[in-house]
Image (cartoon, rainbow, N blue to C red):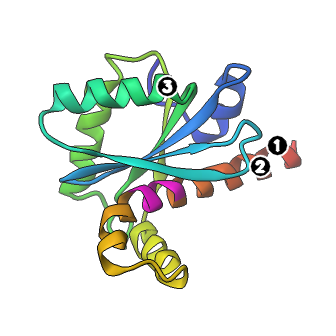
Amino acid sequence: MSVVEIADIASLLPKGAVVAGLDLGTKTIGFAVSDLGMRFATPRPVIRRSKFAKDAELLLQMLAAEHCGAIVIGLPLNMDGSEGPRVQSTRAFVRNIERMTALPIAFWDERLSTVAAERGLLEADVSRRKRAERIDSAAAAFILQGALDRLAREITSS
């Protein structure tokens, strides 16, 4: 499949599948998954980035192991809404990965997701070292939670 609108995720999700959330960093890929009811996002271990082929293989294995039926990927827009080099890199990653999977992929505006994730980890009194290890997956969970909340509003308003 290809890139879809976030509102279409619920109708494209196979029964018994969950939604994955990704936060693409330069060194890691944050990974999170929803519950079956699509209410809660839970962080999973990060993928340490190396070469695209290895990253993609590991990501596809994790998606299969978690029974993911769709992917929400953070789109790192600039604060003014414009697209910079990080957005171009994210779109290139998606173009490459969509050739390798039939899963629908939706973009989600990730502005301030890392800031919110860091704040949450600080409030949970997570040590600096552990925060550094968990920040990307926490950001992925924040991105996914925003998308899940939007999907819930779509469902209740229809």
Does 112 sit left or right of 153 as displayed? left
Cβ–Cβ under 8 Å for marks 1 and 3: no
- Magenta includes 120? no
Mark 3: which secondary structure? helix
Among the 4 quarters of the image, the one containing residue 69: top right
| Residue at 25% in and 26% down | 96
Q: Amino acid at mark 1?
A: Ile
Distance between the alpha carbons at the discs numbered 1 and 2? 5 Å
User: Which x, y percent locates residue 118?
Assistant: 42, 76
Q: According to the image, label 3 marks what residue?
A: 65
Residue at x 54%, y 30% (from the top left corner): 66
Residue 17 shown left or right of residue 15 in the figure:
left
Q: Quadrant of residue 155?
A: top right
Q: Position of residue 10 (x, y in %)?
A: 70, 32
Can you identify the residue that label 2 sits on? 152
Crowdedness near tag 1: few (<14), some (14–19) or many (≥20) residues, C-alpha within 10 Å: few
Q: Residues within 10 Å of mark 2 (few under 14, many from 20)?
A: some
Magenta span of residues: 137-141
Q: Position of residue 158 (x, y in %)?
A: 87, 41
Q: Which badge, 3 or 2, comes first in the chain's sequence?
A: 3
Check the image and report above or below for 126 versus 35: below
Mark 3 belongs to which amino acid? Answer: Ala
Q: Nearer the viewer, mark 3 or mark 2?
A: 3
State yes or no: discs 1 and 2 in contact (Cβ < 8 Å): yes
Type of the residue with mark 2:
Ala
Disc 1 or 3, which lies upstream in sequence?
A: 3
Residue at the spot 46% in from the left edge and 15% down from the top edge:
102
Say which residue label 1 marks. 155
Dot label at residue 133: none
Prevailing SS of the magenta stretch = helix
